[in-house]
Amino acid sequence: MKSHPLDALAQQLMAPDRGILAADESSGTIEKRFQAVGIPSTEITRRDYRELLFSSPGIEQHLSGVILFEETLHQTSREGGRLVRILEDRGILPGIKVDRGIKPLPGRPDESVTEGLDGLRERLAAYREHGARFTKWRAVIAVDEQRPSPLALRANTEALARYAGLVQEAGMVPIVEPEVLMEGSPDLDRCETVTTAALDQLFSALQAYGIRLEALVLKPNMVLPGKQCTRPASVEAVAEATVRTLARTVPAAVPGVAFLSGGQSPEQATRHLNAINQHATRLPWRLTFSFSRALQEPPLRMWAGKEERIRQAQELFSQRIRLNSLASMGRYHPDLEKVA
Ligand code: 13P
């Protein structure tokens, strides 16, 4: 098959020792995160916070892309230029979350489907025009003994495939994110079974829609027990289950896998990413990060809206990015948390 310009873009996103920052929290989500540290959520505070992140020292050495929320794509920096210019000037690709969030699945109110396909073709053309080079769509799969239903898997993977097709048609790289939630009491085995089924079905749908696998990035959950599970899993067991799941389901044509952090603590997410990379010696794709909370918690808490703390917050953020870059090469060690 002939190579395509989008393949090179996907490879650029998955470049060695780099990862992706998810800074695409919707207005509702960022408001909750800000509230937790006592910051009012206004257009200005959201702009200031994202500008703090994007201008942190050295991040361009370890970040290939940043996923933005639509508002950020149109915002102006403190100095008056476009906020995305800060990223572009540092060689970091701007991306955008394009889904419209999750809604109850008709007939299955305890499950969800992601909305946003109507009018997406027109929105994508506008995002591309404003500098977006890649996109994200998140599907959410809840797990317990009865869930997910076959219907929830089908509705969500079909939507992901239709989205991916529209994005490639618009000349951007789609990140496809089927998030199996680590909530409730399911154990590691149950999470592995469900993640395997979700990825299997996702790649069948992507193939059915003729999606170019070389020009997309997969953003899955790591395989983890639910937060209320009474049988914790070791770092090694998580790495083994995650790598086995991907090896069984993800075609070799896909250039890379960028994990979400899913509510893990920053250190836990880094440790798991590192163990996954140490475990994965003969796999065809890159395995890296596309975290939101696990990268942003330390700087957000440090900043807490205070001008005089910007520098320290940026240092914490740059440190997390650097440590996760090491983990994406299997070269992280917990001792680095102290010295960095
Ligand atoms: P977390 O890393 O906080 O799970 O967020 C990743 C993300 O982009 C969710 O869509």
Image (cartoon, rainbow, N blue to C red):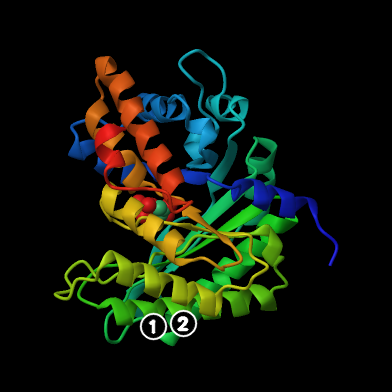
Q: Position of residue 225 (x, y in %)?
A: 26, 72
Q: Position of residue 274 (x, y in %)?
A: 39, 55
* Residue at 64% from the left image edge and 73% from the top image edge: 206
Give, as a three-letter code, the residue at label 1.
Thr
Q: Position of residue 245 (x, y in %)?
A: 46, 76
Residues 270 and 76: in front is 270
Q: Position of residue 177 (x, y in %)?
A: 49, 62
The quarter of the picture where the C terminus appears is: top left
Asked whether residue 28 appears in the rendered view, the answer is no
* Residue at 54% from the left image edge and 51% from the top image edge: 98
Give, as a three-letter code, the residue at label 2.
Ala
The quarter of the picture where the N terminus appears is: bottom right
The vertical placement of 200 against 99, above or below, is: below
The quadrant where residue 284 appears: bottom right
Q: Secondary structure at mark 1?
A: helix
Residue at the disc numbered 2:
197
Residue at the disc numbered 1:
193
Q: Secondary structure at mark 2?
A: helix
